[in-house]
Amino acid sequence: MYDHVLILGYGQPSSAGEIKPFLEAQIKFKELSPDRLPSRTEQFQKAAGTYNYAKTLTAFSEKLEKALTAFGMQMPVYAGARFMAPSLKEAMAKIKKKRHSRGLALILAPFKCELTYERYQEALKNAIQEAGLSIQYDFIKIKHTHPLFCQALAERARAAMRTLTLEQREFVHVVFTAPAITQMMSQLCDYEKEVSATCAIVIKDIAQPKWSICYHSADSSKEAWTDPDFATLMTQFIKEKERHALLVPVGAIAETIETLHDLDIETRKKAEIGGYGSMRSAAVIEHPKFILSILDILIEKLKKA
């Protein structure tokens, strides 16, 4: 029997003072090239104070716990991020105090690769050892084709499109976005296939004829990354005479520097230079249907335990 649920997030700086330790931790775990430290620091400073990741992740875990209770399952839900607050160390301290012994660990990532799965497992293993605990976890992740998850993405996209006139919507090109991973990593998993599967479901729901997939936030290393990026797509826009790009971040469950800077600032700037309007749909972590999709996954797993 499971005695608790642990939500595993990535983590983001929620204040200017957290930027440096966050980026240094990314470099330590080889998730950021050292030569990007100055530029990434500047980018975080531009987006600082616009979003509190820690508060959002904690609120999400609290909502999930209340929802489980409503369905007759008294199950405490904790939140822990790989980087920054609420930290895994803090989560382990709470779990230790309650003397839990077996839990479900839900990774807040819809598409599976080493970065979105194995590294979370490793981080939790290290946190357990540091806390001196002996806890068994079964890992699950977001189902990338879950109807409620895809409906949440579609509703976010439609909400963004409602800011346009009916005439403008005829010239909208939907651009689904996901974080770039290296081509080498992609060859070892189904990351790109999973991204495509989600996008195919969502585009059918929002019924827009013109759409593409692009990958953003590639590191500056010499490795090859998943493509195309937005700049490459712009050549297609020129040919097809689109006027507006609607960015739908299917890979970002919560707002991150990738959405707040890379999409909202950098990609928007590229669109404006190319003569296009650009808008973005919001992340889904606070959408009721997304919460229900996670609840559905958890209840299914808990009933089988």
Image (cartoon, rainbow, N blue to C red):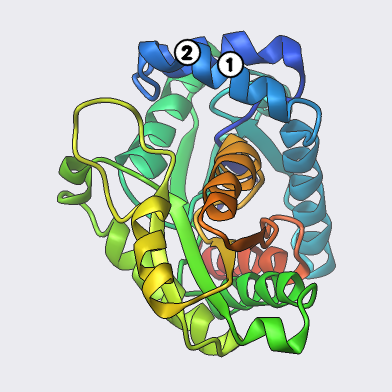
Local packing at callout 2 (Cα closer than 10 Å; few below 14, some 14-19, many 20+) is some
Q: Are marks 1 and 2 in contact (CB under 8 Å)?
A: yes
Residue placed most toward the observer, 32 or 151? 32
- The x, y position of residue 293, in whole percent, is 63, 69
Query: Where does label 1 land, which residue?
Result: 41
Q: Secondary structure at mark 1?
A: helix
Q: Quadrant of residue 63?
A: bottom right
Residue placed most toward the observer, 303 or 244? 244
The structure residue drawn at horizontal position 24% and vertical position 40%, both measured from the top left corner, is 182
Local packing at callout 1 (Cα closer than 10 Å; few below 14, some 14-19, many 20+) is some
- The x, y position of residue 108, in whole percent, is 55, 48
Q: CA distance from mark 1 to mark 2?
A: 6 Å
Residue placed most toward the observer, 98 or 7? 7
Q: Quadrant of residue 230?
A: bottom left
The structure residue drawn at horizontal position 71% and vertical position 88%, both measured from the top left corner, is 167
Q: Amino acid at mark 2?
A: Leu
The structure residue drawn at horizontal position 16% and vertical position 42%, both measured from the top left corner, is 184
Above or below, 243 against 294 in this view is below
Q: Amino acid at mark 1?
A: Thr
Residue 27 left/right relative to 101: left
Residue 23 visible in this rendered orientation of the protein? yes
Q: Secondary structure at mark 2?
A: helix
Above or below, 298 against 29 in this view is below
Residue 251 left/right relative to 283: left
Above or below, 89 against 244 in this view is above
Residue 133 left/right relative to 112: right
Residue placed most toward the observer, 304 or 185? 185
- The x, y position of residue 269, in whole percent, is 58, 45
- The x, y position of residue 236, in whole percent, is 36, 69
Q: Which circle marks residue 37 in the picture?
A: 2
